Amino acid sequence: MEKDSAKIEKEKQLAALAAVTYIQDGQVIGLGSGSTVYYAIQEIGKLVQNGLQIKAIPTSHKTQFLAESLNIPLIDSNSVDSIDVTIDGADEFNEDLVLIKGGGGALLREKIVASMTRKKIIIADSSKKTDKLGLKFKLPIEVIPFASNLVINQLKELGGIPKIRQQTGKEFLTDQGNWILDTDFGHIEDPYSLSTSLNEIVGLVCHGIFINLADIIVLGKDETTQTITASKIV
Ligand code: 5RP
């Protein structure tokens, strides 16, 4: 067990270091959230200390505080029209580069930042690759608390089993003050049609299915990395 978690940490680190090599001087960088991106942000901090000139946009308060502690210059998301490169993590992904995200609850800002980005890089350890999206990981869905009952009922009609995410005995709050419904859809065979149906629910702010929001996946695999682009492993 301990050996497994050490292997996973190593894979996360390797993927993060490989992804950071895509960053160039003068670029605007999107900083994702989570324990894999943590390693990338640490590395970017070192590069900035050694003279790399970038401006970054964080996808969560947690990422913002980490970047600030490393003196990575941050800018407002509304101060630019596009982002050059974003490095983010994922909870699951399949060979079509469809992702499930939101394990850390930062899915809304992550989706916004990804939508603004030209080169979207996802970093992950080998446990995240799957051919059955949703089977192991429940789909995070951000909802306005006022609309939670309405959304819960609609998710049930779509065949989901939603559960309000809890943290220390209370509802988990996103950076926007919303709730997360971790929703069990079993194996999500058609993420495209589920995504379309979810997008139509009033009061549902964002769901964790990310389609066309990954250009490259850098996957840690044992002692090395694999780069996956749509239907291709390099
Ligand atoms: C947060 C996310 C993260 O990218 C996702 O949960 C992966 O996190 P980790 O790298 O810790 O496994 O979507 O909302």
Image (spheres, grey):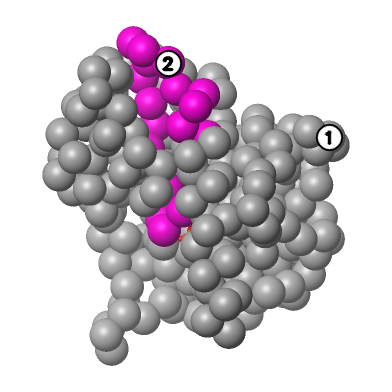
Residue type at numbered disc 2: Gln
Q: Quadrant of the C terminus?
A: top right
- SS of the residue at dot 1? strand
| Mark 1 neighbour density, 10 Å: few (under 14) some (14–19) many (20 or more) | few
Q: Which residue is mark 1?
A: 232
Q: Who's the residue at 48% across and 51% down the image?
A: 13
Provide the residue span drawn in magenta: 19-37
Relative vertical location of residue 218 with respect to residue 89 in this rendering, above or below: above
In the rendered structure, the answer to whether residue 56 lies left or right of residue 184 reads left
Q: Quadrant of the N terminus?
A: bottom right
Relative vertical location of residue 174 with respect to residue 49 in this rendering, above or below: below
| Mark 2 neighbour density, 10 Å: few (under 14) some (14–19) many (20 or more) | some
Q: Who's the residue at 28% across and 89% down the image?
A: 169
Q: Which residue is mark 2?
A: 24
Provide residue 12's location: percent of width, then percent of height: 52, 54
- SS of the residue at dot 2? loop
Judging depth in this view, the residue of 174 and 231 nearest the camera is: 231
Relative vertical location of residue 134 with respect to residue 70 in this rendering, above or below: below
Provide residue 27's location: percent of width, then percent of height: 37, 15
User: Quick one: label 2 or label 1, which is nearer the N terminus?
Assistant: 2
In the rendered structure, the answer to whether residue 82 lies left or right of residue 196 reads left
Judging depth in this view, the residue of 135 and 232 nearest the camera is: 232
The extreme bottom residue here reads 169
Residue 51 falls inside the magenta stretch:
no
